[in-house]
Amino acid sequence: MDIKIRIEKVVSGGLGFSRIDEKVYFVPFTLPGELIFGEIYEDKKEYAFVRVKEIIEKSEKRITPVCPIFGYCGGCQLQMTDYKTQLSIKKDMIEESISRIAKIDIPVMDIVESDKVFNYRNKGSFQVFNGSKIGYCEPGTTDPFPIESCPIMEEPINRRIKEFLTIEEENKKIEGMKALVIRSNFESKIIDSTIKKDWFIENVAGLNFIVDIDTFFQVNRTIIPKWLGHIKDLVLNYKVGKGLLDLYSGVGIISQYLAPYFDHVIGIEINKTLVKNGNKALELNKINNTKFITADASRFYSLGFIYDTVIINPPRKGISYKMIKSLIQSKPKVIIYSSCNPDTFARDIRQLIAGGYSIDYIQGFDMFPNTKHLEVVGVIYLK
């Protein structure tokens, strides 16, 4: 069914939003104020998703995307507008999530911008198909299409893609593979998944980390120091106690950066490889007051780790109800929560606030320009 609607705002997921007769319509790749003619491709009782067929009235903020396959690829959602507008949209997205899910009214600060808007990603995950072509899958499908480069990847990654596609010896390395991961580091060195267990040293904010193909690591190194610096300022402002507990610590980016400001630091991470590489990084960085252990972060309370200051940087799904209960029970005085998902962040702080905590403001960081994704940071503290 076709429909004509006016876009009111952009909400979580980078989707244009419109409401008609109590029904909500979500429209990808649209901007506030635009009048569109589209086709409903998923229709539910209370909401529907619409595919644009024609933009009848374009926003003055709409620009020509840099990427020729923008809107088809699905990896970027906001490339059709300038960067300042992207930042404004992302701030609005956070405010909408906090209002709708957390049910509170608190200030959301202007988004801290990335130094790079393109060529910032230090990791790319690709499909390999038809023997040795490299590409992505169409959104919502397993159907791949070929690419020769990606404008948000760091240039060393794009050069490596070109080598695989144009050099016969390199092309043979990906024959028969279904997926390919390529990473680049601060020295423009490359590792990829054609070599198992390959790794290199990544350096951010003056610290060295061991990173392999599968390591979770922030993909935009230009903004990591700003993000870490903000967390450090929060710690110094709200600091209580002599110890720091870092939940979902990964390779320990946050806890190693904060180690000089505490007597002792414990990081809890369920991935054994990340813990091993985190502890090796402690030696590289000559940090003696920190250790990482392999455990389920949600079990921190039963493991006996109870600290006044806690850092939480969970996966996109947020933290479990079990962890919420443990936090409320153990009553750390300060929780610094960093999340890549405003919706689950809002859900979790709502439960913490119900358990006796307060939050004063939220700060966003644009870790992922041109996309719907961003990082949000908030301090939740006992009243």
Image (cartoon, rainbow, N blue to C red):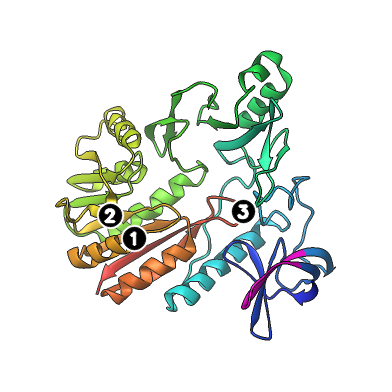
Label 2 close to label 1 by CB (< 8 Å): yes
* Residue 59 in sight from this viewpoint: no
Q: Amino acid at mark 1?
A: Ser
Q: Which secondary structure lies at badge 2?
A: helix
Quadrant of the rendering where the C terminus is positioned: bottom left
SS at badge 3: loop
Q: Is residue 181 above or below residue 137?
A: above
Work out whether residue 110 or residue 352 is closer to the camera in this orientation and state it.
Answer: 352
> Badge 2 is on which residue?
298
Q: In the picture, which quadrant includes the N terminus?
A: bottom right
CB within 8 Å, label 3 to label 2: no
SS at mark 1? loop
The type of residue carrying mark 3 is: Thr
Which of pointers 2 and 1 lies earlier in the amino acid sequence?
2
For badge 2, the amino acid type reads Ser
Kindly report which numbered mark, 1 or 3, lies closer to the viewer in this rendering: 1
The stretch in magenta equals 40-51
Q: Tell me which numbered mark, 3 or 2, is placed earlier along the sequence.
A: 2
Which residue is tagged 1?
Answer: 320
Is residue 284 visible in this depiction of the protein?
yes
Residue 372 lies, in percent from the top left, at: 59, 57
